[in-house]
Image: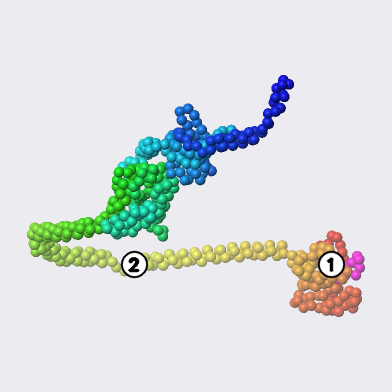
Amino acid sequence: MDLKSQAGANVAEFTVSELSGAIKRSLEEGFGHVRLRGEISGFRGPHASGHSYFALKDDRSKIEAVIWKMTYSRLKVKPEEGMEVIVQGKVTSYPGSSKYQIVIESLEPAGLGALMALLEERKRRFTAEGLFAEERKRALPFLPSLVGIITSPTGAVIRDMLHGFNERFPTRVMVWPVRVQGGTCAAEVANAIAGFNRLTGGGPIVRPDVLIVARGGGSLEDLWGFNEEIVVRAVAASVIPVISAVGHETDWTLIDLVADARAPTPTKAAEWAVPKFSDLDDTTQSHGRRLKIAARRTLEHSRSDLRAAARGLPRLQDVLALPRQRFDACDKRLGRALLANTRAHHTRFARVSARLHPGPILHRIAVGAERVGVQHGRAGQALRNLLQRRRQRLEGFDKLLSTLSYQSVLQRGFALVRDADGRAVRSVADAPVGARLEVELQDGRVETRVLGDAPSDTVTESVAVDTGGNESERSSEAAVPAQAAAPGVRRSRVRKSDDQGSLF
């Protein structure tokens, strides 16, 4: 144990990160860039970050692989599950999981046979989905007002197509420029097809009636962008009919199978999109001549039929003879019927008038007048009885009112005291010193004022008011003796008492 401890003391000590970094540097310095062939396994498309992670394998081994986002966007052929590829990249390790991997910088199919196998596999898959079925393809418009072309604006293809339009039938053309080769070709073509379909008739840009996707000839690798799934599905989802004109007549791509029509060359696509003007003019003139001949023949047949029908019709005199005779017979019968009807009504009137004389009418008038007189007398008597009952009831109410009125109490020697606001004074506490009061007696009213010159007595200054409403001279108990009071002036003294109300 001592020998082992002494031997271990000379070994360098690393941390986990230091050892992982040393292994990473050893891999990168030992291998550098390598070219590797294998089959793609575990590919599920780019990650949310844009990077792609998968593995390359053969029949015995497997190595992890990664493609960074920028590298993936530049690839001409995108990786797919099961594809055999040749990649070039740098061998390194990922210290976070102690795995070594290859960072891919370029990717290409492992030979032409691999591309053809991938193409056939996609063709089988899209056929199973029904994207190549003939029943889903739409007919091309006979005379489009606007043709949309998706191609490169700088190549010879667009010039040949415009020349074809001018020769056959000059029409409006809208070009959506795209790259027809390279890593971005498929995305640009798919975006162009979707962009044309998003246009509406009411917007500033009119939507085309037909689309043409065009490109010149090339190798399978050059035309590979038109075999991508994104392009095939964009054509299948297009509402506008699509003509495929990619490559020469011997070339074919998946877009040719899904498009509504496949032209052997871009020039042929222009010829298919619009009719030939001269042929259209000849056809129009031929139809016009046929229309004139058909109209002339129709008029002649109609004229012959009319003449034949006219010969079969009876004469006007023959048609009106029988109705005229019937009318004359009715006219004769009508005159005799009017005379007979007049005689019958005259006889009936004579019988009725014989029974009419003024005697019964006068008798009815007399009887009615007698009944009216009787009803008039009964109505007068009833009215008098009602007035008598109402008068007796009113007198009873008057007696009851006189009995319950406070004025009857005043006639028995009591008085009613009110304050300046007209409210009844029911207690001495309601008559403070200096308050003006009104005392109503049987024969008039007296206005007083509370003086209060003694603690036990409340002295008031009174002004007598006669029943006519005239005020007498004012007097004060303190100033004028009782025996010296002038006529018409009265003094009143109110003594506080707990049990006395407003009447005294």
The amino acid at mark 2 is: Ile
Quadrant of the snapshot with the C terminus: bottom right
234, 251: nearer the viewer: 251
Q: Height in image: 425 above or below 217?
A: below
Tell me what residue is drawn at x 30 percent, y 57 percent. 163
Residue nearest the observer in this picture, 79 or 470: 79
Q: Quadrant of residue 3?
A: top right
- Colour treatment of the image: rainbow
Q: Is the residue marked by circle 1 packed among few (<14), some (14-19), or many (20+) residues within 10 Å? A: few
Considering the numbered disc 1 on the image, is that residue within a helix, a strand or a loop?
A: loop
Indicate the position of residue 65 as horizontal and vertical percent values. 51, 36
Q: Which residue is mark 2?
A: 361
Which segment is the magenta one? Answer: 453-460
- Residue matched to label 1: 432
- The answer for how far apart the CA atoms under marks 2 and 1 are is 90 Å
Residue type at mark 1: give it.
Pro
Q: Is residue 96 visible?
A: no
Magenta-drawn stretch contains 40: no
Q: Nearer the viewer, residue 439 or 270?
A: 270
Snapshot quadrant of residue 223: top left
Tell me which numbered mark, 2 or 1, is placed earlier along the sequence. 2
Q: Position of residue 121 (x, y in %)?
A: 38, 36
Q: Residue at x 31, y 69 (%)?
A: 358
The reply to whether callout 2 and callout 1 are in contact (CB within 8 Å) is no
In the picture, the quarter occupied by the N terminus is top right
